[in-house]
Amino acid sequence: MIPRALTVAGSDSGGGAGIQADLKTFQELGVFGMTALTAVTAQNTLGVSGVWPLPPEAVVKQIEAVATDIGVDAAKTGMLFDSAIIEAVAEAVRRFAIDKLVVDPVMVARGGAPLLKEDAIETLRRRLLPHALLVTPNIPEAEVLTGMTIRTRADMEKAARAIVAMGAKAVVVKGGHSDGETADDLFYDRTRVEVLSAPRVATRNTHGTGCTFSAAVTAALAKGEDLLSAVRTGKAFITAAIREALDIGGGHGPTNHWAYRAQRDS
C-alpha cells in the first residue's frame, strides 16, 4: 500500500509554510500527500498581507472526498482560523475515524499576523485536542494553551502534562524559542518523558518550521512508524531543513525541504 497523508491547513502563497510546506515534506518522505484547504493567505518572507478563510462546509467536503475514496493513513492540522472550522474538522475526524491525527496549533505567523482567532482557542482545546494522537506546540503556543509561563525544562514538562490532560494522547513541546546552545524538544505520552536535542542553528530563515516538523511526523506515522520514532524522524527532518535553510526573499526565508533526503542519501 502507498502511505497516504492528509494536511488540513491554510495555503501560503510564498511556499514556505502551510499546505505547500506539508506537501513538500510528504513528498520528500515518500508519502502521497492530500489536502483540505482551510484558508488562503497572501504572504511571503516579509509577512502576511491577507487571510481569506473557507466556509466550514467546504473544508469538510474536501476531507470527505479524500477519506471516502483514497483513504487516510495519517493526518495533520495546521491553520484552522476560527471556531466554526475547528468544530467542522473535529467532527470530520470523528466521522471518518482518523486516529493518527497530529495537531499543530498554529496561532501566529512568523511575522506576527494572527492565524487563529482568540475566541477559537477554547474550541481547539475542547473539541480538537481530544482527537489528537500528538500535539506539537512551540513554547508560546503551549503557554497560550495552558495559561502557563514556560522558562525551564520543568515548565515544559508541566505544560506537556497539562496538554495531555486536555485529552491528547501525547505532546511535543518544541524548544526552538528557548535559549541555549541546543534546541531541545520535550515529548510526553502519559507514561514517559523524552528530550530530543539538536544543535541550535543561528539563522533567520525559519519560516514554516512548525508546519514542516508536524508534516514530517505525520508522514512517518503514515508509513507505520510508532509515535516516538515518528517524532524522532520529524526532529531529524526539521534539523536538516533549518541547517540548510534557503536564503530567499527579504525577510524570514523558508527551511530547505530537500536537505534531509540529500543528507540521508549522501
Image (tube, rainbow, N blue to C red):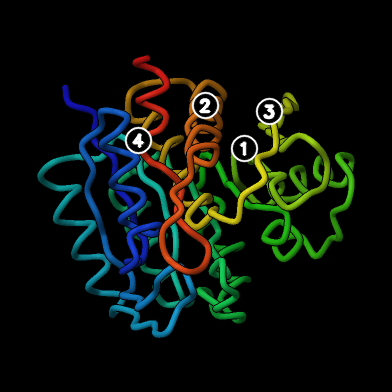
Mark 2 surroundings: few (<14), some (14-19) or many (≥20) residues within 10 A: some
Q: Quadrant of the N terminus?
A: top left
Left or right of 61? Residue 44 is: right
Residue wearing tag 1: 170
Q: Disc 4 and disc 1: Cα gap in Å? A: 28 Å
Above or below 87: residue 16 = above
Please report the residue visible at 39 percent of the width from the left and 57 percent of the height from the top: 16
Residue wearing tag 2: 227
Mark 2 is on which residue type?
Leu
Residue wearing tag 4: 258
Mark 1 surroundings: few (<14), some (14-19) or many (≥20) residues within 10 A: many
Left or right of 181? Residue 59 is: left
Q: Which of marks 1 and 3 is in front?
A: 3
Q: Which of marks 4 and 1 is in front?
A: 4
Q: Position of residue 266 (x, y in %)?
A: 37, 14
Please report the residue visible at 81 percent of the width from the left and 40 percent of the height from the top: 157
Where disc 1 sits, the SS reads loop
Where disc 2 sits, the SS reads helix
Residue wearing tag 3: 196
Q: Which of marks 3 and 4 is in front?
A: 4
Mark 4 surroundings: few (<14), some (14-19) or many (≥20) residues within 10 A: some
Q: Disc 1 and disc 3: Cα gap in Å? A: 15 Å
Closer to the N terminus: mark 3 or mark 2? 3
Q: Position of residue 251 (x, y in %)?
A: 51, 67
Mark 3 is on which residue type?
Leu
Closer to the N terminus: mark 4 or mark 1? 1
Closer to the N terminus: mark 3 or mark 4? 3
Do the CB atoms of the residues marked 2 and 1 lie less than 8 Å apart? yes
